[in-house]
Image (tube, rainbow, N blue to C red):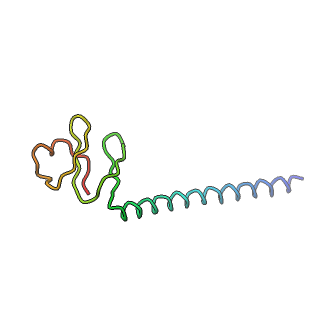
Amino acid sequence: MAQAQKERQAGLQRSAEIVDQYWKIQGQQDRSLKDFSDYIRGNQTYTGPGGVNYTLPAGQTYWQDAQGNIIGSNDPNSVVLRKYPICTA
């Protein structure tokens, strides 16, 4: 009886490990497919202040103004925009 319980417990543990590995792989595939989709569409995901994610057109430098507006610019030397950098492409 004790041997059967050990085997059952070991089987449950193996099943849990398999399920955990499955979901880990699914998460990796989801990220890869999103990255590819963004690449095809010419977008890039940026992380702004507070961990907020923005999907914006790739190839520009982005800034956030005092009101929280996201501003894209091809001129990173702009004096007005240099105050609130959030990310660069």
Which percent across, then down, holds residue 7? 80, 58
Q: Residue at x 50, y 60 (%)?
A: 28
Q: Residue at x 61, y 60 (%)?
A: 22
* Residue that appears at 46% across and 62% down: 33
Q: Residue furthest toward the front?
A: 41
Residue occupying the far top of the picture: 67
Q: Nearer the viewer, residue 20 or 58?
A: 58
> Residue 36: x, y in percent?
41, 64
* In-front residue for pair 41/10: 41
Q: Position of residue 13 (x, y in %)?
A: 71, 55
Residue nearest the observer in this picture, 81 or 38? 38
Please indicate whether residue 17 sits to the left or right of residue 55 in the image: right
Question: Of 83 and 3, which appears nearest the observer?
Answer: 83
Above or below: residue 83 compared with residue 46: above
Tell me the quarter of the picture where residue 10 sits. Answer: bottom right
Q: How many marks?
A: 0
Q: Is residue 85 left or right of residue 29?
A: left
Where residue 65 sits, quadrant-wise, is: top left
Q: Quadrant of the C terminus?
A: bottom left
Taking the image as shown, residue 24 lies to the left or right of residue 57, namely right
The percent coordinates of residue 86 (x first, y second) are 25, 46
In the picture, measured across the screen, residue 64 lies left or right of residue 10, that is: left
Most extreme residue toward the right is 1
Residue ID at (55%, 58%): 24
